[in-house]
Amino acid sequence: MKKREVDHSLLDKAKINKKDEFYTQLIDIEKEVVHYTKHFRDKVVYCNCDDPEYSNFWKFFYEHFEELGLKGLNATYFGEDARFYNYDGKEITITQLKENGDFRSNECIQVLKQSDIVVTNPPFSLFREYISQLDKYDKDFLVISNINAITYKEVFPLIQSNKAWLGVCFGRGISGFIVPESYELYGTETKVDENGKRIISPNNCMWLTSLDNEKRHQPIELVKQYEGNEESYPFYDNYRGINVNKTQDIPMDYMGAMGVPITFLNKYDPEQFEIIKFRKGDDDKDLKINGKAPYFRILIKRKTA
């Protein structure tokens, strides 16, 4: 299949809020999408925060259109010169938008309704609205977000009700984002690659998806014991459950409620554990141990012994 040459330089064009100007590397898209290939056959993919002149999401799905068996590929982006791109496997049609290409605009919502799966890196500052829109229109998705998005009231209920879950790559599993020259590169997790692209690796991002993957059906191997180590698992002041500081410390011999860190969801197998609730005790206040609240906890319970 003929490949379209796409310029991925990000140094000349900044159309969105500076804090949201993080562009996903092709290698990270490739590493994640490979786990969902069966879901894309005969589907229309929509990259609704993506200018095809710069977007690696568009590049990936354009170049792998036939391999994935796609039915169509759509893209829109925010900007004064916003356009709608459609690829049907034969030709690209480009239409000037009347509005500004914001994913919340009427034009973009109409494209969303005609699409099956949304794949992109949306603006983190608008992620609550973004995920709510996908839920409202009942669209499948594979999107990048900050790990703390797990705590959002728009996101956690989707995870608890098994309508969304974490993808395969998580934290350091996402190698980094391309940023423009206006970004200051500081710390050890930054570099300029061989093509002059400026990369930062925040190590605090994840994929959130409604597409099933093999990882979420792999049970956690439990090796720790509760009996004889009770002092390591204190009960909460305001909930009948024990605190577990690390996912790897979940005891194999305790079947009651447990509070675990939000990173547990990276290992969560819905056949192994039930999610009870998030963060709050019986008094509807933050979970506490001896009067002090640990960082956000998810209350879980084993399903099987």
Image: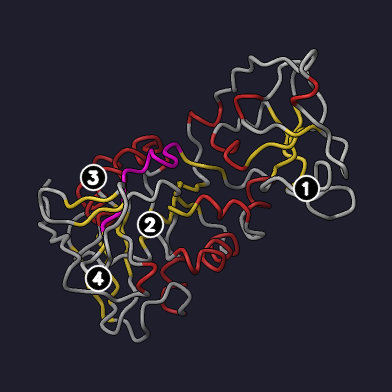
Marks 4 and 1, how far apart in space? 41 Å
- The quadrant in which the C terminus is found is top right
Q: Say whether disc 2 or disc 3 marks the residue closer to the N-terminus.
A: 3
Position of residue 72 in the picture relative to residue 299 (left or right): left
- Type of the residue with mark 3: His
Q: Specify whether residue 250 is painted magenta.
A: no
Residue at 70% across / 31% down in the picture?
Answer: 244
Task: Indicate which label's residue lies in the foreground, 1 or 3.
Answer: 1
Circles 4 and 2 in contact, beta carbons < 8 Å: no
Vertical relation: 140 (above or below) 86: above
Q: Which residue is mark 1?
A: 292
Q: Is residue 68 above or below residue 283?
A: above
The amino acid on which the numbered mark 2 sits, given as a three-letter code, is Thr
Residue at the image position 38 percent from the left and 57 percent from the top: 120
Element type where label 3 sits in the image: loop
Secondary structure found at label 1: loop
Instruction: Tell me the magenta residue range.
Output: 168-178
Circle 2 is placed at which residue position?
Answer: 120
- Gap between marks 3 and 4, in whole Å? 32 Å
What's the residue type where badge 1 is placed?
Lys
Q: Are marks 2 and 3 in contact (CB under 8 Å)?
A: no
Report x, y in % for residue 243. Answer: 75, 34
Up the image or down, 125 lies above or below 236; here it is below
Residue that label 4 marks: 182
Estimate the spatial distance between the alpha carbons at disc 1 and disc 3, rounded to whole Å: 51 Å
* Mark 4 or 2: the one toward you: 4
Q: Earlier in the sequence, mark 4 or mark 1?
A: 4
